[in-house]
Amino acid sequence: MDLSSIAYPKLEDIQSALFIQPHPDDNEIGAGGTMAYLSHQGIPVYGLTVTEGRGGSKTIEPEELGKIRKIEAQNAMDVLGVVNLGCLGYHDNRPIIHETLVKELVRIIREVKPQAIFTVDPQLPDEMHPVHIQVGRAVQEAYMRCGQIYYPFEDHAKHADAFSPDIIGFYFTADDNTILDISDWMDLKCEAILKHKTQVDRQTLESFKAFYALVADGTDYQYAERLKLLSSVHTHCFAIPTAMKALLKK
Ligand SMILES: [Zn+2]
C-alpha cells in the first residue's frame, strides 16, 4: 500500500518556521538544536513569545523581570539566527483567554506565513504548567483556524490573507515521530540557553545536557531532540495505530 499521502512531514523539507513559546526560554530549551539546524539551512526561522515570564524569579520584582527576560530572549534568538517577533505580553495580571490568544496567533501566522509552526505539546502526559497547556492548545486551534477564510467569524467578512502552514510541530513531547541529531548544534543550543541568565545557571545546564544525551539513547548520536511533526491530514479525526506509526516515517 502506498502510504506517501499520509506520511509524517520531514524537517529537511521545511522552508520557513515559526517557533511559539509559552515563556522566554522554552524554544531554546526544548528545540534550540532544531532552530539552529533550520536557520543554518539558510531558511527564515522566527520566534514568538506569549508571556513575559514575570513569575520566574524569587528575587527579582515581576515587572523588572519581564523587562530583563525580553532582552534575554532577544540575545538567545540572536545566537541561533532566529528572527524575534517579540512577546505578546501576557503575564499574571493578564490571564490567558483562549479565544483572544488564538486570534492573536492567527493574525501573526497569516502575516508571517511560515511553512511550519512549532510549540510545546499540550498533551505531554505529566505536564502540569497551565501556561504550557494553554499555549499549546491555543497554537493547535490557531493552526486549524488560520486557513479559514471567515475566521474570526464575528467580522462577518472574508479574510483574503487566510493561510495554513503545511506543518505543525511539537517539542517537549512524549509522542515523537522525528529525531534530530543535534550533536553539532549542542554548543549553540547551550550558548543560547545560557543567555537566559535569570533562569539557567551552569548546574541547571548540566541537567539539560544529561537529558538531551538521554533523548539520544538508542541512536548513534551524542545529543538529540525529539519532535512530533504533523500535517493537516494528521490533525483531524484519524488516529494512527501506534504500531503503524513507524510506517509513516517515509
Ligand atoms: Zn515554560
Image (cartoon, helix red, strand yellow):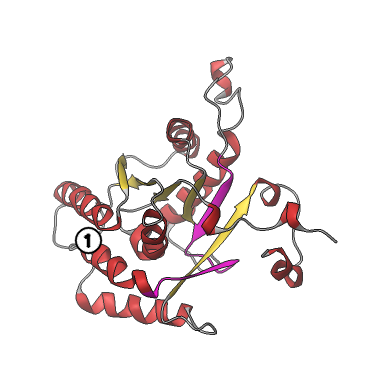
Specify the amino acid type for callout 1.
His
Q: Give the range drawn in magenta.
A: 165-183
**On the picture, is 249 further left or further right than 67?**
right
Q: Where is residue 13 in the image (x, y as percent from the top left)?
A: 55, 53
Residue 95 seen in the current view: yes
Query: Residue drawn 31% across and 66% down?
Result: 189
Residue 91 shows up from this direction: no
Q: Which residue lies furthest to the front in this view?
A: 42
Q: Is residue 34 left or right of residue 55?
A: right
Horizontal side, residue 160 vs residue 182: left or right: right
Q: Where is residue 231 in the image (x, y as percent from the top left)?
A: 63, 49
Name the residue nearer the viewer: 5 or 127: 5
Residue at (34% x, 78% y) in the render:
209
Residue 224 x %, y %: 45, 74
Residue corresponding to mark 1: 196
Horizontally, residue 41 falls left or right of residue 123, namely: left
Q: Is residue 138 above or below residue 33?
A: above
**Which residue occupies the foreground of this view, 151 or 133?**
151
**Most extreme residue toward the right, as rendered?**
1
Q: Is residue 241 magenta?
A: no
Give the quadrant of residue 1: bottom right
Q: Is residue 49 above or below residue 218?
A: above
Secondary element at image label 1: loop
Q: In which quarter of the image is residue 174?
A: bottom right
Closest to the observer, 95 or 123: 123
